[in-house]
Image (cartoon, rainbow, N blue to C red):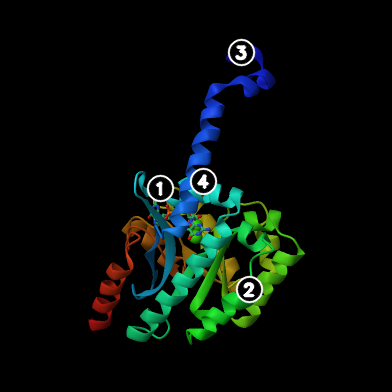
């Protein structure tokens, strides 16, 4: 039956019906999960390459669903985006991250910064209320620069005037801006022109073969030189080996993130790490 051609195939294919059903169920569970607070944030250290100290962290969402178990973001963020649920979910993420960074700044380092992934769908939504975000930050008595919003290049393709204005409003208030997964999109360079970007995050795909691919080394070096000339700092993602770390350090990369330093951990585990570093 599959040879009959695309149109017929797509209408009667039972597996598509199954998929639609499983998406409906997942969506139902996501909605419930929001009400029942089944989401939590993990934190992955971002270290200063020169000193090895944990100066920032990226908040990464996890979902502990009673029946499904631990669900990773790759398996539910796309559906949350399609359904619009990412908007209330994103509000929760932002609030939680703001509270957490406040605590870490008080206990350990007044300069500690948290980086938060912001979906293009959130920024495009008319429901997203930037002034509420900023009020929330002010109430916590931290400067908005304690938070970085990570946006992907995909944002550029989908963005409109209103979403650009939201980014600009948050930035004007002091929130920092990072371009995530740099190099994998289409319009990286025009993005650099349009916004005043604070950080570029070199995508893992350029980092994972650094130790055996001289072209990747050249690419990373070039990105770092370009970024620094534009007064942008560079975070390398997915650093898994000492060799990769050394090459990036040599190339002048500012920050590193990856399993080589630390995998994403709970807030309590990151607290321990920060405590240890403080005692050193
Ligand atoms: P991302 O923003 O590029 O996040 C980095 C991902 O790489 C994380 O996966 C992290 O666990 C993983 N990673 C970190 N170091 C290494 C390494 O050394 N090697 C390898 N192989 N992987 C590494 P995770 O947590 O599963 O998140 C996947 C994606 O889901 C994120 O990619 C981001 O696009 C999205 N996401 C995660 N949390 C959020 C969130 O709170 N909001 C939104 N909108 N998206 C999120
Ligand atoms: Ca990210
Ligand atoms: Ca990334
Ligand atoms: Ca700048």
Where residue 228 sits, quadrant-wise, is bottom right
Please indicate whether residue 250 sits to the left or right of residue 128 in the image. left
Q: Which residue is mark 1?
A: 212
Label annotation for residue 90: none
Q: Which residue is mark 4?
A: 27
> Which residue corresponds to mark 3?
3
Query: Which label's residue is closer to the chain start, 3 or 2?
Result: 3
Q: Are marks 4 and 3 in contact (CB under 8 Å)?
A: no
Nearest-to-viewer mark from 4 and 3:
4
Mark 1–mark 4 Cα distance, whole angstroms, equals 43 Å
Where does residue 16 sit, x and y in percent of width and height?
A: 56, 28
Instruction: Tell me the residue that label 2 is attached to.
Output: 130
Alpha-carbon span between mark 2 and mark 1? 44 Å
User: What whole-number distance in Å separates the C-alpha atoms at marks 3 and 2?
Assistant: 51 Å
How many dots with numbers?
A: 4
How far across and down, in percent of the image, does residue 56 sit? 42, 73
Marks 4 and 3 sit apart, C-alpha to C-alpha, by 32 Å
């Amino acid at each position: 039956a599959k040879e009959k051609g695309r149109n017929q195939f797509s209408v009667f294919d039972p597996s598509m019906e199954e998929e639609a059903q499983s998406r409906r169920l997942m969506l139902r569970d996501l909605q419930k999960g929001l009400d029942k607070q089944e989401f939590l944030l993990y934190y992955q250290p971002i270290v200063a390459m020169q000193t090895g100290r944990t100066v920032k962290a990226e908040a990464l969402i996890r979902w502990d669903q009673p029946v499904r178990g631990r669900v990773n973001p790759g398996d539910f963020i796309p559906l949350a985006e399609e359904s619009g649920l990412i908007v209330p979910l994103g509000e929760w993420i932002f609030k939680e991250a703001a509270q957490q960074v406040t605590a870490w700044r008080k206990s350990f380092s007044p300069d500690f910064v948290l980086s938060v992934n912001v979906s293009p769908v959130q920024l495009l939504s008319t429901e997203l209320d930037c002034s509420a975000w900023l009020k929330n930050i002010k109430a916590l008595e931290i400067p908005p620069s304690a938070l970085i919003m990570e946006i992907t290049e995909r944002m550029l393709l989908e963005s409109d005037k209103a979403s650009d204005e939201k980014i600009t409003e948050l930035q004007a208030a002091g929130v920092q801006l990072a371009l995530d997964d740099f190099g994998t999109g289409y319009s990286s360079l025009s993005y650099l022109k349009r916004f005043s970007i604070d950080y570029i995050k070199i995508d893992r795909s350029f980092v994972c073969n650094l130790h055996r691919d001289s072209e990747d080394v050249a690419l990373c070096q070039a990105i770092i030189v370009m970024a620094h000339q534009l007064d942008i700092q560079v975070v390398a993602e997915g650093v898994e080996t000492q060799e990769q770390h050394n090459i990036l350090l040599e190339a002048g990369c500012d920050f590193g993130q990856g399993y080589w330093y630390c995998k994403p951990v709970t807030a309590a585990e990151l607290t321990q790490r920060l405590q240890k570093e403080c005692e050193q």
